[in-house]
Amino acid sequence: MVPEINSRSPQNCRILVIGSDPGSRETLLEPLRWEMWDARGVSSSEEAEALFDSWRPQIVLLDANPDPQGAAWVTNIRGRLPHASVLFISDDSGTDAIITGLDQGADDYIIKPFVPLELLARIRTHLRIRDLHEQLVIANEKLKELVDIDDLTGLYNMRSLYQRLEFEIERGRRFGRDVCVVMMDMDNFKSVNDGHDHLFGSYVLSEIGKIIKANTRNIDIPARYGGDEFLVVLTEVNEEGARLFCERLRKAIAKNTFVSGEDSINLTVSLGFALVQPGEVLSSKELVRRADHALYEAKRTGRDRVCTFVPNNNVHALPVKKIADPASLRRPKKASGG
Ligand SMILES: [Mg+2]
């Protein structure tokens, strides 16, 4: 939805006039009041700076010439109010002065004596530009969210995940901390789509997203890797911590009954994880590949379990070990795809 342009009420337009001459200041303030704008005048930099934080003007009229003092003013305002429009109001009508003023960072240059209605029209233009700028900032933030987040599960998507994983590996290397990648895949997810309404599959995936979120910390990076496959980056965790996390997640999903309307189902997941340890040089792709290898082994050895990758020089052996899980030993599962 495109927000309404220029939707602000006049009272929400904050305009600050800075000028040492009281008569000149008043000449500027009077037409601003015709428009019902929230206009204030100050005579010194100290007074103006006090308002920068508390009142945050959107337009600043600088009743000064673009000399070194004027330039210092513009720099100061730009630093404190990066999104405010700054207008020189000057009695120097020379082309050099106008160019200097605009080059000093002012958004506009108005020559005294000015026609009040023209001054108001110019300020309205700057208010419109400000509105568009604000809308652009909001739209950009929304767009970024859409690009980074998987809309079905609310988790990160694969694209944004790799950027974050690279960053975490680099951070782990620098600060001597482990980084862990967990790969998780739903067991027999095909049965969800086959036996139920096709929307039920989407519902189950969105619920899985919620369970993953509920079981991760703020510093972890949970993502949907695609289809019914998920990936979680765990930071500041050792192998034991990673194993506990995986088991907790596995059990949370196994004990949950997914119910939507007439449909209901119980599901299990398989997980594999791999760690990059301090001093180890490993790319994000290789780390994910290792976790995927461990996941494959969890699938191969019966599903509903957690496996970890064990580095091994023997390329012919599957470098994975099954983690002892008494519960799964009591309930052996049959492997049958997915
Ligand atoms: Mg699957």
Image (cartoon, rainbow, N blue to C red):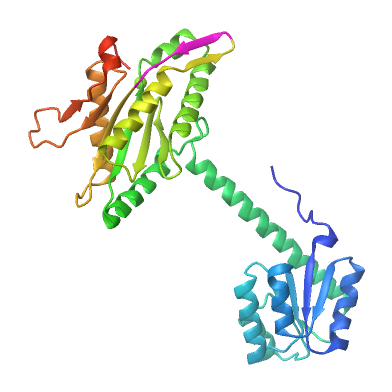
- First to last magenta residue range: 262-269
Specify the quadrant of the image occupied by residue 111: bottom right
Query: Is residue 62 toward the left or the right of residue 331 in the image?
Result: right
When the figure is inspected, residue 163 is found, relative to residue 324, above or below; the finding is below
| Quarter of the N terminus within the rendering | top right
Secondary structure predominantly adopted by residues drawn in magenta = strand
In terms of image quarters, where does ligand 1 lie? top left
Seen from the viewer's position, the closer of residues 142 and 253 is: 253
Q: Residue furthest right?
A: 34
Query: Is residue 258 toward the left or the right of residue 267 in the image?
Result: right
Query: Is residue 212 toward the left or the right of residue 288 in the image?
Result: right
When the figure is inspected, residue 280 is found, relative to residue 128, above or below; the finding is above
The magenta stretch spans residue 264: yes
Specify the quadrant of the image occupied by residue 329: top left
How many labels, in total? 0
The magenta stretch spans residue 52: no
When the figure is inspected, residue 50 is found, relative to residue 178, above or below; the finding is below
Residue 45, given in percent of the width and then of the height, sits at 70, 83
